[in-house]
Structures are given as structure tokens and as C-alpha cells.
Image: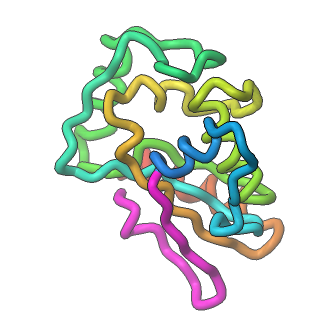
Amino acid sequence: MKVEDVPRSATCTRRSIALRDLLTRASGDSRASWLDVLDSPGIYVVQLDHDISLEFLETCGLASHATPWAVKELRAKHERIHQSSSTDILYLGKGDNIRKRVQQLARFGVGRADNHVGGEWLWQVARASEATVVMQSTPRGKQVPFEGWLLETFFAA
């Protein structure tokens, strides 16, 4: 499964922002604007272009609250995921408010928050900052089942 395979209806909004931009906002001393991040329930996907080779670091970089995995385990996980089909998806999440959830993700990634559970290994990807965060709104209450369906479809591919 790739980001382009994520279905959307005519009523949803989809927006993409460079992860590097979000990390810069989260690490800055001044109050950054997050108004371009969707302020609605939905899902978000961290997408890394296929042209970028996936290399893993021993540490989680600036994500000081993350617990690093063994690189050997990450490589094995990556190989299992790619056995049946290739993907550009590094992480898939949901939120009652995408803006809040993406802010948490970015603040976690620069070590300024400890409140983003899941995807800690994302910060061990050598070029994670070159990823894109693709956000998609959903009707209220549909973000949880939609994320569940996406994960099920992702791992079944």
C-alpha cells in the first residue's frame, strides 16, 4: 500500500506538509503558526519518497523521549513489510484533531514533548526529516475505524 492508495471521499480534505517544516516549527523558540495543518478529525501518514533509501540509526536523534529499537530488528521489520509489496508509508496515525496530533508528533521528534505514543522508531530513520506528512480529514468518529481499516489493508498487502 502506498499513500496514493489511501481512498478519500469528495467530502474530505487532503493536505501535505514537509516534515522538515513541521520539525522547524516545533523546535523554534517563538510561537509558530500551525494554521495550515488540518484542524479536524482524520488520519495522517508520514510518507518517504521511494528514491530515498531507508537507513536506520542507532539512536532516535533529537527525539529524546523515544526508546530506540535495535537496528537489526528495524531492518527485519522493514523487510517483512516490503516482502509482498513496496510502500512509501513510514507511519500512519489518527487524531480527533489532526493539528494537535501532528504538533505532538513534531514536538516529540525534536525532544520537546513526551506525549506521542507510537512510531518511536520513525526517528531512527536516517532521512526522516525528508518525509512528507499527508493529512486527510474524516467525518467525526470515523477516524478510528478508518485508521484500523488502513492498517489492516497495509499489513495484508
Q: How many marks?
A: 0
Residue at 39% across, 68% down: 5
Quadrant (top left/top right/bottom left/bottom right) for the N terminus: bottom left
State whether residue 134 is above or below residue 81: below
Q: Which residues are magenta?
A: 1-18
Q: Give the image location of residue 102, x and y in percent.
A: 65, 50
Residue at 76% across, 68% down: 40
Q: Give the image location of residue 42, x and y in percent.
A: 69, 64
Residue 37 in the figure: left or right of residue 69: right
- Verify whether residue 71 appears in magenta: no
State whether residue 13 is above or below residue 11: above
Q: Give the image location of residue 136, x and y in percent.
A: 59, 69
Residue 41 in the figure: left or right of residue 156: right
Q: Nearer the viewer, residue 125 or 31?
A: 31
Q: Give the image location of residue 81, x and y in percent.
A: 33, 37
- Verify whether residue 9 appears in magenta: yes
Residue at 35% across, 17% down: 57
Q: Nearer the viewer, residue 114 or 86?
A: 114
